Image: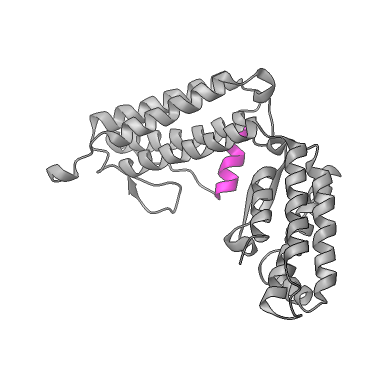
Amino acid sequence: MPPQDERPSGDEVRAFEAAVLSLQGFVASLPAEALREKAWGPREVLAHLLVWIESHAAQAEALLAGRPVHPLHGTFDEINARAVEAVRGVAAEEISRRLAAACERLVAIASQHDPASLPLVLKKGSQPRPLRWFLEGEAGHIRWHLDILERQAHYDAAARACALEAAVDRFCQSAPLPAPDSNAASALAHAALCFEALLAQLQALSAGQGFTLPSGAPFEAQIREAGRAMPEATMDRLRAAGAALGERVRTADPQDVVVEIWRLEMRRGLMCTTLDAALDLLESLLHAP
């Protein structure tokens, strides 16, 4: 039993319940067209949240009953892909109902037991954390997804394309040309190659072809090689890739386009994300010091 000042206040439960209610209210307000099956739309986000919260509840129930615990296994992208595939053909209302039921199970456990002393894991091999940590984390996780979905509900593809093209133009017109083989030349080369890689990936997706995103040491080698070139040529590559990417973005639904993008300064480690998030990461390169 933890000391009195460490006992859970219930705030984490209330925050979790409030986040779930906000998400459900938003999803219920969407038109039917917005709830169709997509690469990563509202239905897929519900399925993604469902698999994690069901896992938390199942683990806690197993611990309390003295049964073996079976956490999720695989990479995050693999788990999320399985979650989405499992609800293909299932109505969004049913996914939302199942999510509500899983959340109720988790809240009931936290209300009847000490959530600071029930150790769960995110997935197989993860560090054990108390249920309280998961409630707090899932509240933030849900709010994060809700914020993205709310912004996507008002997404204007043409305006997003114009903003991207304008950001590239501003950068190309205002950034001083760096000396070849300098740190600034490497940063410029990095930006140009990232724009070109996303463009090539979108072209491959449109053609139904596979695409391998360059990463790690081979990608660093490409950056060094491009950084030794004349900066004017690299700037032209960035400008051309930005214009071509803008044309692709102009008619795209970001929830129907899932791409791979880099983690950690967009160079090492890969993750899947929607097109709008990938564009935000690309634009951040144009503002980096």
Is 265 above or below relative to 155?
below
Is 58 above or below relative to 71?
above
Rendered image quadrant of residue 230: bottom right
Residue nearest the observer in this picture, 260 or 52: 260
Q: How many marks?
A: 0
Colour mode of the rendering: one colour
Describe residue 105's horizontal placement relative to residue 25 as left or right.
left
How far from the left and from the top, in percent, is residue 151? Answer: 60, 35
How far from the left and from the top, in percent, is residue 84? Answer: 61, 34
Is residue 208 at least partly visible in the picture? no
The residue drawn where x is 55% and y is 50% is 75
How far from the left and from the top, in percent, is residue 109? Answer: 30, 30
Does the magenta-highlighted stretch encompass residue 81? yes
Does the magenta-highlighted stretch encompass residue 249? no
Q: Residue furthest front?
A: 174
Type of secondary structure dominating the magenta stretch: helix
Is 37 above or below relative to 201?
above
Q: Residue furthest left?
A: 4
First to last magenta residue range = 75-85
Quarter of the picture holding the C terminus: bottom right
Residue nearest the observer in this picture, 168 or 263: 168
